[in-house]
Image (cartoon, coloured by chain):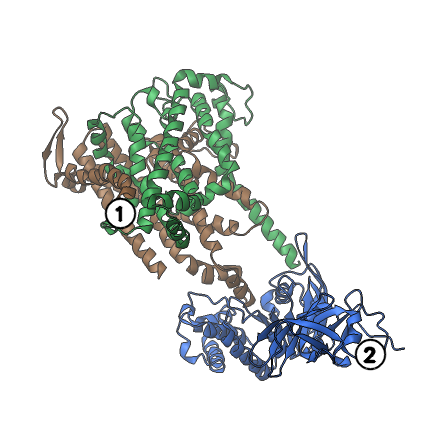
Amino acid sequence: MTNVLLKGIEKRFGSVEVIRGVDLQIDDGEFVVFVGPSGCGKSTLLRLISGLEHISAGDILIGDRLVNEVQPAQRGVAMVFQSYALYPHLTVRDNMGFGLKVRKMPADERQKRVAEAAATLKLDTLLDRYPRELSGGQRQRVAIGRAIVGHPDVFLFDEPLSNLDAELRVHMRSEIAALHKRLATTMIYVTHDQIEAMTLADKIVVLRDGRVEQVGSPRTLYENPANIFVAQFIGSPKMNVLPADAAPLLAALPATLSPAESVGVRPEHLMVVKPGEGILRGKVTLAEYTGAVTLLHVALADGHTCLAIYDKQEMPEVGAEIGLKADARDLHFFDSHGQATKLRSN
Amino acid sequence: MEAWLFVSPSAVGFLIFFLGPLCAVVYFSMTEWNLLTQQAAFVGLANFEDALLENPDFWHVVRNSVIFALGLVPLNMALALTLALALSRPFFGVVFFRTVFFAPVVTSAIAWAIVWKFLLQGEGGFINQMLAIVGISGPNWLREPNWAMAAVIVTRVIKMVGLNMILYIAALQAIPRDYEAAARLEGASRWQIFRMIIWPLLAPTTLIIMVITTIGSFKVFDHIYQMTGGGPENGTLVLAFYIYQQGFKFFNIGYASALAMIMFVIVMMLTIVQVMLRRKGAE
Amino acid sequence: MTQRQTQILYRTCWTIALLIVAIPFMFPFVWMVSAGFKSTTEIFGAPTLIPRVWRWQNFIEVFTYQPFARQYFNSLYIAILVTVLTLIISSLAGYALARMRFAGAGLLMLFLISALMVPEEVTIIPNFFLIRSMGLVDTHWPLILLPTFGPQGVMATFLMRQYFLALPKELEDAGKMDGLSRFGVWWRIALPMSRPALAAVAIITFLSSWNLFLEPLIFLSSLEMFTLPLALSNFNDSYGLPLWNLQLAATTLAVVPILIVYLIAQRQIIESFALSGVKG
């Protein structure tokens, strides 16, 4: 059982507060993704869990053991770095075996473990190469292999795919997902890419300015974002947020608008109709054809711009007047603080 | 053609004041000079024979130079690396310490030697006065050959160690921090991280610093001139000083030129080693 | 003990160790200044950090014992002249070696590389005869010409070449498109972009000229022509024994201004030496 528990975690670098009180429960075998814009503290939080950075306040428990004062190496965690951190003067074999060697594991046992991991990751033929002789994807796999050989209780990934090109990133993403399925070990994964977060996570933790904005499954975050920030961070293209009085124009609403100040609707939930049919009208200012769908930029009468995904064949021309409507279920309401809210029923 | 306008000032000066003299010293080394008539007579390799086979001073000087290098280079490098390891990461006071350890590098060797000669006097010297307080009767440092050599080596190391420290700091800072973080996570101790990660990654820098420092040790002249004048009993007479002494004190132009040639060959060999190491490091 | 406490203890131990190591680096300067203000009797008495009697007289006698002001000025003007000359010559040659193709470039590079490490002691004897035949003994010319064109100048040329090579070529191409000549590109584009390298060359060249000793020792004989290091080593009585208080007062005058400039610009100066990489 390796759950991870964070209680009131704070971290200051000098006078700069990077993590401002994080509470989080991570269950055994869960794949948790920390996501957020750069500078939100997600990598710092990971390094606090690893022990590479020391917490300023709070408690960290790994497998029900308080590890605040436990050395990184004794926490039972392994980390895959963004830069991979493969030692350039050691071969793949020695890189993967390094941790076992400094822990004084007998050589034959070490070889067995390395061979095992190499087989899992299809690195068998590369064991005697040096990191500089490997491609980006291969280095990535060695970095993962190095983490695997120690049989850690928790895997930590710090933006592991950000140095790969787009195609390889998609491929490695699926390999990491498969790895998690096979090992069923707790994994904590940091990324700034919300697609990576959505596809990999059992549970996503959205961070901003050192605080947790929302924790939940990808579906929860998409369907019930807790606030405007999460609503706009998850999902691509990002959610349109309009003044609340636009809502009755989009759909028939059963309730008064109070206390909602704004309404959010995702581009993929906006239906494009003839100008007469929807009451919310706008003018197409730009139509971006991407193949499967077209992304319409629509200027509304009140000066707001919103995005709509249009998946029919005939394209509205730029400058054409169109109407927009949506399903009442797909509207998200936010109060004056940007928090999600329900409309009061009459 | 235009390019030669750019390089000509440099090239002409180089030809006159470096390449020409370098060729001349080859010729000089095979001559015997008559001081009265200022005429040079060709004597072939006699000067080299004199140095290598007959003159006991030469081997004494070589011995001194080797002792000087063997004392200076390891001490300098070990201290430089230790200081660099301590100062390569930001912490309170790091700028102060770097500034202090580098200060002697910008100071003139003569000034440095004057002050140390003053501190190291046999009677009334500050070092011995301090030693007397703890009950040690210090030697007359610069008047006893072995102590003089040790004193010159140590004061030279203090003078120049800052330079190697800076080179080591630059090399250490070029090593990604993640290597150390990864090793720590895998359970390596500070010593293991140094021994198994940092030290191998520093190897190219170490080799180059070693060659540069060794060549530098053969060039030391002003420091020894001021501190010991090559004495006592020729105990600190090293090659650079010997050349000066033979050439400009005793006017043995031919013999001094042969010595210069020998120095040239030693330095060239070390330089070739360095270039080869750099090539290997660049691969 | 918590990790934090261990870390603080560890840091404290290191800092104390570093402070102890720092003593022989700092103390000579302190003692130099202190002794520069002492009388001969106090110098050889029990050691005192603060002189019992401040003998300002020393700093006057320094100037009457030998023409110290003149010698100070010699060092300063020679160092400035060598620095300016080296900057011009090395940046011109360095630019050509970095950016132009010409017959003999490879050969020139080879010669320069081999010159980089050759100690001045190797060529000093023929250079002495060369300078003598030019009638320039006991003038400042050898102190200007030999460093500018010798290993020091070659080092500067290399430093400039390396820096020019690393500059983006597009900017110079843009300059050419705008109708600049080669010389114009060098002067208006390459040089302004090379300030860090020029500063490094200036700092290292100035210091090495300021501290130059072998050439002054060999070529200069009259006191008015002496430069500082030679003058410093010359504060001896008629038996050849050092006049410690005068010598240390003079050394203080020579060293302290440089140290002050160093303390102000330590970052820049240390970086310059790191950039040059090969020296000492």
Give the quarter of the figure containing the C terminus of chain A: bottom right
Q: Based on the displayed image, in which of its 4 quarters is residue A290 positioned?
A: bottom right
Query: Is B214 in front, or is C124?
Result: C124
The chain letter under disc 1 is: C
The spot of residue C218 in percent (x, y) is 28, 28
The spot of residue B146 in percent (x, y) is 35, 38
Task: Give the numbered dot on residue A299.
Answer: none
The spot of residue C65 in percent (x, y) is 40, 16
Q: Which amino acid, by three-letter code, is at mark 1? A: Ser
Q: Which one is closest to the eye, mark 1 or mark 2? A: 2
Give me the residue at 11% from left, 25% from top.
B37
List the residue tagged with mark 2. A253
Q: Secondary structure at mark 2?
A: loop
Give me the residue at 36% from left, 59% from top.
B282
Chain in blue in the render: A
- Give the CA distance from mark 1 to mark 2: 87 Å
List the residue tagged with mark 1. C114
Question: Around disc 1, counting alpha carbons within 10 Å, would you say few (fewer than 14), some (14 to 19), or many (20 or more)?
Answer: some
The chain letter under disc 2 is: A
Q: Based on the displayed image, in which of its 4 quarters is residue B57 positioned?
A: top left
Query: Is A313 in front, or is C160?
Result: A313
Q: Secondary structure at mark 1?
A: helix
Chain in brown in the render: B
Q: Which amino acid, by three-letter code, is at mark 2? A: Leu
Q: Is residue B133 visible?
A: yes
Chain in green in the render: C
